[in-house]
Image (cartoon, rainbow, N blue to C red):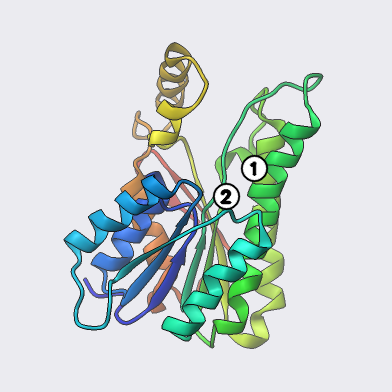
Amino acid sequence: MSRLTSKIAVVTGASSGIGLSVAQTFLAQGAARVYLTGRRKAELDRAVASLNARFPDAGQGPRAVGVQGDVSQPADVERLYSLIRAESERVDVVFANAGYAEPAPLGSLTEAHVDGLLNTNVKGVIWSVQGALPLMGEGSSIILSASIVASKGFGDWSLYSASKAAVRSFARTWASDLKGKNIRVNAVSPGVIDTPAWSESDMPKEQVHGFFQFAASVTPMNRTGRDEEVAKVVAFLASDDSSFVNGSEVFVDGGMAQV
């Protein structure tokens, strides 16, 4: 399927997990080039190398380009878009995916915890989208990575949930901001997805396993979601086929998607 033929895309937080799966799906569906960002250079370099091995250069330079940086730092984001301006001159799709989760109960919240989550999960989304706007034309698509926790009340996850609620709100308000420019803004809200972030977290393995079992038990398919399922939804929202979808939130949970 060549749903994204010739499109130039940006995927933040793409070294692994959902971001990497989305970058791979974009290339598989015909994107001319995907710019990937990540904070850890070695992991980002491995991701880019794997994509370029699978989707080789068609004579116009590598189809996957890695730009190491932190989306919470405006200077890093500006460096990303300066490179895109020089190399590709435009951006057709932005998937603002960079973010992280860290539980902490009310009563033990610290300034470092609050600043870390809000700087990356909220400010990072703002800088990633705002920096792309001068390079985006009519028909472009912005997809934000939210979460089902934005509308749930899980204990210990108040700051992460609040950050994703902000992202969900951005999709609605920015769609209104940009409607005169014919640039779509949507959010995808995954459920529990099995990604490397869980095994790399500080949570005990037993706690992660128990959480996954609980999450599977409350989904219609009786299992947790997969990153490639989220990637297919994001690719649809990035395509011209979704020109009628704007300001929406798409839930992806246990193999099912619902607007």
Task: Using the rendered image of the protein, determine whether residue 4 is visible from the camera's viewpoint.
Answer: no
User: Relative to residue 59, is residue 105 depicted above or below?
Assistant: above
Determine which residue is flagged by label 1. 150
Task: Using the rendered image of the protein, determine whether residue 149 is visible from the camera's viewpoint.
Answer: yes
Badges 1 and 2: C-beta atoms under 8 Å apart?
A: yes
Kind of residue at badge 1: Ala
Neighbour tally class for label 1: few under 14, some 14-19, many 20 plus, Cα within 10 Å: many
Residue at 57% in and 62% down? 248
User: Relative to residue 208, is residue 128 depicted above or below?
Assistant: below
- Disc 2 secondary structure class: loop
Whole-percent x, y for residue 59 in the image: 20, 83
Q: Observer-nearest residue: 37 or 133?
A: 37
Measure the alpha-carbon separation of dots 1 and 2: 7 Å
Q: Residue furthest front?
A: 42
Neighbour tally class for label 2: few under 14, some 14-19, many 20 plus, Cα within 10 Å: many
**Rendered image quadrant of residue 219:** top left
